[in-house]
């Protein structure tokens, strides 16, 4: 998940997740500061957010709000998660998610730190990490 610039995010004291999770929204930047970013994702069933990737300088925490997803984190998985579940991908750990089931997968992604530029590396073609 790419960098979220402060002007791109809502950065409000309160965010109504239900109101932000419209059927047309796929990625909604909620918070973007140098310390971290929070993004609301909504993914239709069968779709992937990203190929297998890693964040070489950041940790990512995913909180599943609704739907179900198939996740892979490092050597763990694939495993299916539903709410209320938390998935942790430590810095440098390859991870991947795909929406499964009948309903869209909705989750909050917390990445820290939120560094300018790309902090995501595609590792789907790397046989050492796949």
Image (tube, grey):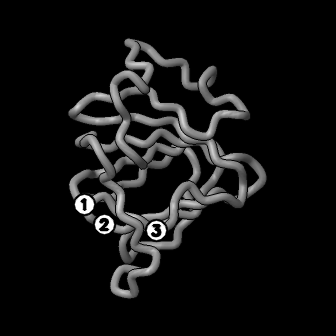
For numbered disc 2, what is the local secondary structure?
loop
> Few, some or many C-alpha atoms within 10 Å of disc 3 (few <14, some 14-19, many ≥20)?
many
Which residue position holds label 1?
Answer: 56
Q: Disc 1 versus disc 3: distance between alpha carbons? A: 13 Å
Q: Disc 2 versus disc 1: distance between alpha carbons? A: 8 Å
Marks 3 and 2 close (CB-CB < 8 Å):
no
Between circles 2 and 1, the one closer to the viewer is 1
For numbered disc 1, what is the local secondary structure?
loop
> Few, some or many C-alpha atoms within 10 Å of disc 1 (few <14, some 14-19, many ≥20)?
some
Q: Disc 3 versus disc 2: distance between alpha carbons? A: 10 Å
Residue in front for this viewpoint, 101 or 122: 122
The answer to whether 84 is drawn above or below residue 94 in the figure is: above
Which residue position holds label 3?
Answer: 52
Which residue position holds label 2?
Answer: 93
The answer to whether 71 is drawn above or below residue 20 in the figure is: below
For numbered disc 3, what is the local secondary structure?
loop
Q: Residue at x 55, y 41 (%)?
A: 41
Please identify the quadrant where the C terminus is shown.
bottom left
Q: Residue at x 64, y 56 (%)?
A: 99
């Amino acid at each position: 998940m790419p960098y979220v610039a402060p002007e791109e995010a809502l950065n409000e004291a309160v965010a109504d997740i239900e109101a932000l999770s419209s059927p047309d929204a796929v990625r909604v930047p909620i918070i973007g500061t140098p310390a971290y970013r929070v993004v609301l994702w909504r993914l239709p069933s069968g779709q992937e957010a990203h190929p297998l990737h890693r964040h070489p300088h950041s940790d990512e925490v995913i909180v599943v709000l609704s739907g179900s997803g198939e996740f892979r984190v490092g050597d763990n998985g694939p495993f299916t998660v539903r709410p209320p579940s938390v998935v942790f991908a430590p810095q440098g750990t390859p991870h991947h998610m795909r929406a499964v089931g009948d309903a869209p997968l909705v989750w909050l992604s917390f990445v820290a730190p939120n560094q300018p530029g790309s902090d995501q590396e595609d590792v789907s073609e790397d046989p050492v990490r796949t």
